[in-house]
Image (cartoon, helix red, strand yellow):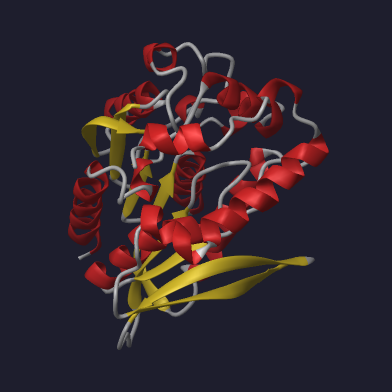
Amino acid sequence: MSVRVLKALRKEPDWATMSDAELTTLQESENRRRALPAARLISGFPARNVTIGWERIDLPGRTLPVRVYRPAGASGRLPLVVHVHGGGFVGTAVQCDWISSHVAARLHALVVSVEHRLVGPGVPLSAAVDDGWEVLRRTSAGEVDADRVAVFGESAGALVAATAAIRARDAGLPLRAQVLVNPCVDLTETALDYPSMREFADSPMLTVPQMTFFRRLAVSDQKTISPLYVDDHARLAPALVVVPTADPVADQGRAYAQRLRAAGTPVTVTEHRGAPHAFLSLPHLVPQARAARAEIIGFLREQLR
């Protein structure tokens, strides 16, 4: 089965007319599907010798679920990787069990994946940004090696991770690395103006109507949560930016890498020819996912050693 066949089997919603109730139904049904054991035939099977379980982080007035990946036999203070799944208005940490578990196993690190609030009516993307930051801030103060901490995000989750890296710098929280996979980092009025957005407007995993719908829900003052437009990109943790080339937001990733590089922040860009958006969650459909996994683990191993 190819990615395009998978898309053809799933009816594309009418994003322009979707009601609040329809969005809630979509979120619930899509996340149930992504969490099914059978979904691993597409999203990949977890690494062996890693325990996976849900835990909760207590915040003022609420608790935040996180999915935790611990390598077998772990002891002492482990490196920490805070991961943020993609999707924005849909998505769950479970869809990333493949990559998160392999990072935990191969780095012998604790991976904590944020089950952040999803964008929806009355829930802007800034809520997910705050959730990601709270998990990074509170977990890195726990029983981990606080000198070996990284953030890792995919798509809208990469926006959360990139913002967490900026907040970490401003708060004086040590951060060794940031990994940004097919990052969406521009939600301003320029978000749809990139050449890649026009070239891949009807790509299998992300379309312009879907992106337009996401922007409408996600932002009020778009520039305040767009990492591309923060005032200062200097002194941030070294970054790996992973760009699938057949992706509407491919040029956003390239633009962000340029901003980091111009500010003196170390950045590595890897491009995966012909890979679509969200390819890292599709290892059984997109072979480039395994090459990206090797790059991510190699980069994190170097930065966290």
Q: Position of residue 160 (x, y in %)?
A: 52, 45
Q: Could you say which quadrant of the image residue 76 lies in?
A: bottom left
Q: Position of residue 213 (x, y in %)?
A: 65, 26
Which residue is at the front of the view, 132 or 247?
A: 247
Quadrant in which the C terminus is drawn? bottom left
Q: Residue at x 38, y 11 (%)?
A: 195
The reply, left or right, for residue 76 in relation to residue 154 is left
Which residue is at the front of the view, 93 or 202?
A: 202
Vertical placement of 224 versus 108: above or below?
above
Q: Could you say which quadrant of the image residue 47 lies in?
A: bottom left
Q: Residue at x 18, y 55 (%)?
A: 298
Q: Position of residue 2 (x, y in %)?
A: 34, 38
Vertical placement of 64 versus 225: above or below?
below
The reply, left or right, for residue 137 in relation to residue 287 is right
Q: Residue at x 61, y 57 (%)?
A: 32
Q: How many marks?
A: 0
Quadrant in which the N terminus is drawn? top left
Asked if residue 150 can be seen in this view, the reply is no
Q: Position of residue 237 (x, y in %)?
A: 33, 47
Asked if residue 229 can be seen in this view, the reply is yes
Q: Residue at x 48, y 53 (%)?
A: 84
